[in-house]
Amino acid sequence: MRISAFVLRIIQQVIRDKRTLALILLAPLLILTMLWLVFDSDKYDPKVGMVFSQPQQEKMIKHDDFKVYDSEAKARKAVKDGKLDGFVQLDQKPKLVVEGSDPTVNQLVMKKAQEALASSQSGTAAAPKLKIDYVYGSKDMGQFDSFGPVLLGFFCFFFVFLISGVSFLRERTSGTLERLLASPLRIWEMVISYVLGFGVFTIVQATLISWYAIYVLKMMMVGSFFNVLLIILLLSFTALTLGILLSAFARNELQMMQFIPLVVVPQVFFSGLFNLDTISDWLSWIGPITPLYYAADALKNIMIRGFSVGDISYDILILAGFSILFILLNIAALKTYRKV
């Protein structure tokens, strides 16, 4: 009897907490649906080009699935612009040029090029051996080198979001926030103070994680460490301001944790960890509205392709814009608390 009463109390407690109940039922379905959409998508068909040195070569090789370029320079530019994953340069010694930042895509490009050359050979003659050139990366590049920049950004985002959200929540539950709201301190001054205060630890954490990943774990690094640090710091400030903002809508630590499957996990699927070209068009709009999408793109460009600050200025502006937007929303959210 006592056990049944205890069980009934727990059930009623969960049912009364509508947010927890909804997340218990819906969050697993959301994650499973995203996994299904990502892993059950169509097989990626690499974009490969061809450069013929002699006109008769076009008749010898079936190249319907290949885009033809009239010079190596144009084909190489298409690779750098992201329009091609690689191209075949047909000369006395055929050469395959691959983009190089994703080992899986590299293998698909090599397979497609070999099949095209093999189809051009008569009888049992073997396809000519290709010399492989990499625009970025190298043949020794592994999966961790390819995924590393995305994982680096994700872990920085996740831990800063979690720590900032829980810390700010404690400010509310301990009554510190109410006392501050009753003081002459302006709302925007309060928000900036929180951002700068938590920002000190964010800078230390971001620097430590970046240094450890690059110099201890030997993650592939072609560009500048300071450029990586710049992106990680911008991403961390975005996570910091977002964590503070969402904590305003949570009553306790458990509810703050419940934002993770809704806010953090979906970003992983659209950050570049998986090939976004195979995701359905109706779903692909999610990536460009998430901060991790731009941070992962910038980190890959710096660490694998060696891009400079000027080359990733678009990603920098977007990340800075996210931080400013969340700061403004924080100010609006705290004004609501002061009215109460």
Image (tube, helix red, strand yellow):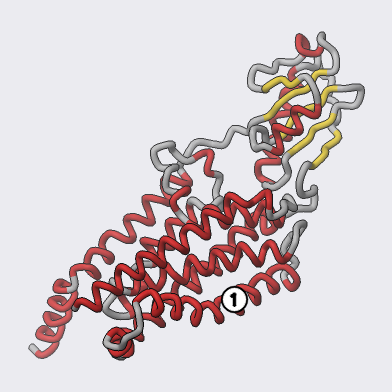
Where is residue 270 shown, x and y percent of the image? 49, 51
Residue situated in front as seen by the camera: 275 or 320: 320
Where is residue 290 shown, x and y percent of the image? 46, 54
Farthest residue toward the right?
92
Question: How busy is the neighbourhood of tag 1: few (under 14 within 10 Å), some, or many (20 plus)?
Answer: some
Where is residue 54 shown, x and y percent of the image? 85, 13
Q: Is residue 239 above or below residue 182?
A: above
Farthest residue toward the front?
184
Residue situated in front as seen by the camera: 159 or 244: 244
Q: Is residue 79 above or below residue 299?
A: above
Q: What residue appears at the point 42 percent right and 48 percent down from the top-left corner? A: 286
- Specify the quadrant of the image occupied by residue 125: top right
Q: What residue appears at the point 62 percent right and 52 percent down from the top-left corner? A: 313
- Please name the residue that numbered disc 1 is placed on: 203
Q: Amino acid at mark 1?
A: Ile
- Specify the quadrant of the image occupied by residue 14: bottom left
Q: What residue appears at the point 46 percent right and 59 percent down from the top-left corner? A: 322
Farthest residue toward the left?
1
- Specify the quadrant of the image occupied by residue 134: top right
In the displayed structure image, the side of residue 137 where residue 150 appears, left or right: left
Name the quarter where the C terminus is drawn.
Answer: bottom left
Where is residue 166 shown, x and y percent of the image? 39, 80
Name the quarter where the N terminus is drawn.
Answer: bottom left
Q: What residue appears at the point 65 percent right and 74 percent down from the top-left corner? A: 207
In the displayed structure image, the side of residue 269 where residue 141 appears, left or right: right
In the displayed structure image, the side of residue 28 where residue 124 appears, left or right: right
Residue situated in front as seen by the camera: 177 or 68: 177
Q: Is residue 175 above or below residue 327?
A: below
In the displayed structure image, the side of residue 329 where residue 17 appears, left or right: left
